[in-house]
Amino acid sequence: MDILVIGGGWFLGTAVIEEALGRGWGVTTFNRGRSGTLLPGVRHVIGDRTSVEDLARLAAQGPWDAVIDTSAAEQPPNVVLGGARALESATARYIYISTVSVYAGWPDHPLKVGDPVLDAPADADREYGRNPEGWRGPNLHYGRQKAGTERAVVETFGTERSCLVRPGVILGPREYVGRLPWWLRRAERGGQILAPGSASKTIQPVDVRDVARFAVDLAERPGVGVYNATAPIGRDAMSSFLGACLAVTGGKGELQWVPDEVLLEHGVRQWTEVPLWRTGEGVWLVDSEPAYAAGFRCRPLEETVRDTWEWLQAGNAPVPHPRAAALGIDADRERAILAAAGSPR
């Protein structure tokens, strides 16, 4: 097998490359080469997916058995459309890593493959679907943009030559968004720790290596389809996740659970100020059974926590990214909320 990985220098892309190399495959990567790590044993093509000339030069390096696109999270639909068209004759199939945010019902309703997705044309630019000023609901702009990128891939390759993989939250070594690293560092500091919502609230983050393995599996198989990629519903709780963070960092902290309504009263920003906390009913009710039937496997969350901590302790750091700066609650604000909730200081 010979595959092209679009991206490959950061998080998921690197995991895909490592998985493919472990199978003895030939791997070509395409990225700007400005950040991240260029792994040995890989043919690197440096270029920008917004450049027609760079895409033509890339296509000339083919053919490949499959393309795995891991880097479109920051790209508008028209850019993904241009890349898909440039590569249509250079590859047999296109595996596109999308997001559950494309669903019209996310994050408020339970979700399954086949549910309606947000509407966006394949040639939409970056401004399409932007939330109106003052909007306080979910980030529909992001979901619409990703729905448009999916359409760009499917319209170009057809349903018979494309696979869409829709993860929820991806954690693990090299995570540049910083959700799990933030919680690990907070657990390491110890003291009274604001634990959001209910201890029994279930969550569904997935390990980056498991998403990578599934994407590589799909590249090798003749089948096509659309798959959600999350941990099983109800398997993991917020309490077990935070408990694992405390365990691997030394267990010096004490969790103080603060109800959703108290956090909302204090205007705590969901998803960012307290990472992984969100009140929408459907956030962690994403059905991924079709993926499991197709061979997807999700390792224990405790393993993801442990391996990420070991990666950080080895002196590694994720590629700097603006999204990481928005994460985490200020220590003084955390203490104030704990005091208001009646927790000891």
Image (tube, rainbow, N blue to C red):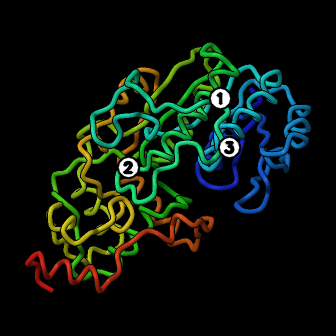
Q: What is the C-alpha distance between the residues marked 2 and 3?
A: 32 Å
Image check: 96 left or right of 172? right
Is residue 128 toward the left or the right of residue 298 in the image?
right
* Residue 279 image offset from top left, x and y in percent: 24, 52
Q: Is residue 263 left or right of residue 298?
A: left
Mark 1 belongs to which amino acid?
Ala
The residue under label 2 is 138
From this view, report whether residue 324 is shown above or below residue 145.
Answer: below
Mark closest to the chain's N terminus, 3 or 1: 3
Q: Are marks 3 and 1 in contact (CB under 8 Å)?
A: no
> Which residue is outermost to the left?
342
Residue at the spot 21% in from the left edge and 58% down from the top edge: 239
Q: Position of residue 178 (x, y in %)?
A: 48, 64
Quarter in which the C terminus is drawn? bottom left
Residue with the mark numbered 3: 17
* Mark-to-mark CA distance, 3 and 1: 24 Å
Marker count (numbered): 3
